[in-house]
Image (spheres, rainbow, N blue to C red):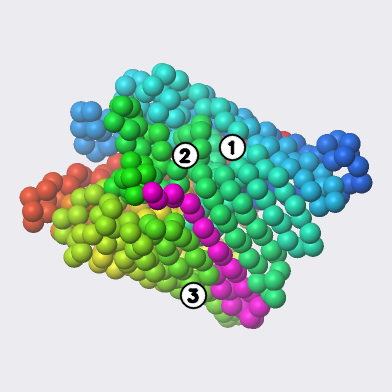
Amino acid sequence: MLKILLVLMTLFIVLEAEDGLCKHGLKCNMIHFHKESPEDVSSLEEMFSEGMFYGRLRFNSFGFKWENEIDNRRKNHAIAGMGTSFHYRSAYLNGFGFGVGVYTTQALGSLEATDVHIYKAGKDLLSRYNALHQNKNTLNTIAQGYLEYTFDDHTLKAGRQTFESYLTASNDTKMIPNSFEGLTYYSKSLYGTSLKLGYLTKQKLRDHTDFHHVLAYGDDSLDAYARYSENDDAAMHRGLTSSKLEDLGIRDKLMIVEMKNNSFRNLSLLLNYTSVPDLVSSGMLEAHYRLDIENWTIVPGVRYMKQLDNGAGKIGGANIKTLTTGYTNPDSVDTQMYGLRVDVIQDNFKLRFGHTQVEDRGDIIAPWRGFPTTGFTRAMGQYNWYANTKSYMVQLDYEFEHIPNFKVLSRFVLQDFDNHKEGVPSDSSVFTLDFAKTFLDKSLYVKTRYAHVVGNTMVTPSGFEKLNPSYDELRMEINYLF
């Protein structure tokens, strides 16, 4: 089935169509960019009438095949979703405006309703909680609804919204974006530095209809499916349960400061601070320098991240799955990460070499859909920021000259996890291949993605058997923007 789907998708994507880039940017599958914005008006009536609608029709499909199936834990599956979204932005009256984003999707999968928790690929096409509780495969939500005030190059926004930063992202690769409730501030130019501030009180993951805790795992003893009701992201710390935090009087709120500076010639600097007070905080510094050598461009980059334990380790343990065997200090999530990369660019060709290494202490906690290793060593569907993990990546991007707006991206990643730790995966090699093209005068975007993961069953010195991570996965995404 996977081979047949791959052939059909490849045939579809290389069909000739009108030239042009995606209406809202080349990466429109990731973030629904608004290239055109409403303008200033002089009356309340015009504030509504001169507002702008942004729409999107979407289709996503996923095929997933494990090398070894396991009853009630791993099953081969296929799932598809079709839906639409509408985002309305009002015009601005004396700097004030508002926006609303409504999203809906319908999923159809190969697994029984009682097995929806087994979906790995495409699990975000439906709500596992709603499917298990109500046998519903639909997602309907108001993921965005905010008030906005702009003045000069500054913007204040309050309410439901997406927020892009180092550890938070809309991560809009499927049907419904990851969004937050809270207050944010943007400055485009503050002494040569762009600034983002965020105070986020709630989160809505892509497979949720309602907003929930930003850093609390559901554990209501009266609800058999409580683990899917709060933050159930794959990178969520399972030991930080809602009942534990409630007993301790901890209110999980997310605070973010991010600054980017391009004042220095050929040098780009990024600084981020993310904190959940009384639980965990982190600081990140990233720098890239551009070197032009004849018709080649070389861009070396570094990233350093330091995570500080403000109480999370004592509450939940050093491992996000609460399996702390093999950890030097099982009650601390203090850790740090180093990243190095080099880009080699010429015209439509880019080659990237990347490496990341996480200190042998605690796991990095990042369940807000911004990935600590992204851009350096993260491959499709992989989480390689556990303690004592080393990763090595080679990535190739190429945009074809004779097939306008047709791009291929391929990655190969070696992931070296700690074989002494029970709560981390087995070592693996990951190969991914993406094809992306735009059609119909910049309005239709099509993308296929293939992943092949190879690993082995691993037994730790303590006798714990870590499952073979090997699988094949195929995805197809279609976006029509209007």
**Residue interval drawn in magenta:** 249-270
Q: Position of residue 152 (x, y in %)?
A: 79, 62
The residue indicated by pointer 2 is 212
Callout 3 amino acid: Pro
The residue indicated by pointer 1 is 143
Q: Earlier in the sequence, mark 2 or mark 3?
A: 2
Marks 1/3: CA distance? Answer: 37 Å
The residue indicated by pointer 3 is 300
Q: Identify the image quadrant of residue 246.
A: top left
Find numbered disc 1 in the image and state the secondary structure of the residue it sits on.
strand
Q: Position of residue 324 (x, y in %)?
A: 19, 54
Tell me if mark 2 has few (under 14), some (14-19) or many (20+) residues whose alpha carbon lies within 10 angstroms of its own. many
The residue lying at 12 percent from left, 54 percent from top is 460
Q: Earlier in the sequence, mark 2 or mark 1?
A: 1
Find numbered disc 3 in the image and state the secondary structure of the residue it sits on.
strand
Find numbered disc 2 in the image and state the secondary structure of the residue it sits on.
loop
Q: Earlier in the sequence, mark 1 or mark 3?
A: 1
Q: Are marks 2 and 1 in contact (CB under 8 Å)?
A: no
Q: Nearer the viewer, residue 398 or 203?
A: 203
The residue lying at 54 percent from left, 50 percent from top is 200
Left or right for 191, reference 344: right
Marks 2/3: CA distance? Answer: 39 Å
Tell me if mark 1 has few (under 14), some (14-19) or many (20+) residues whose alpha carbon lies within 10 angstroms of its own. many
Callout 2 amino acid: His
Q: Which mark is residue 322?
A: none
The residue lying at 55 percent from left, 70 percent from top is 270
Q: Where does the C terminus fall, quadrant-wise?
A: top right
Marks 2/1: CA distance? Answer: 12 Å
Q: Is residue 35 above or below residue 418?
A: above
Q: Which numbered disc, 2 or 1, marks the residue closer to the eye?
A: 2
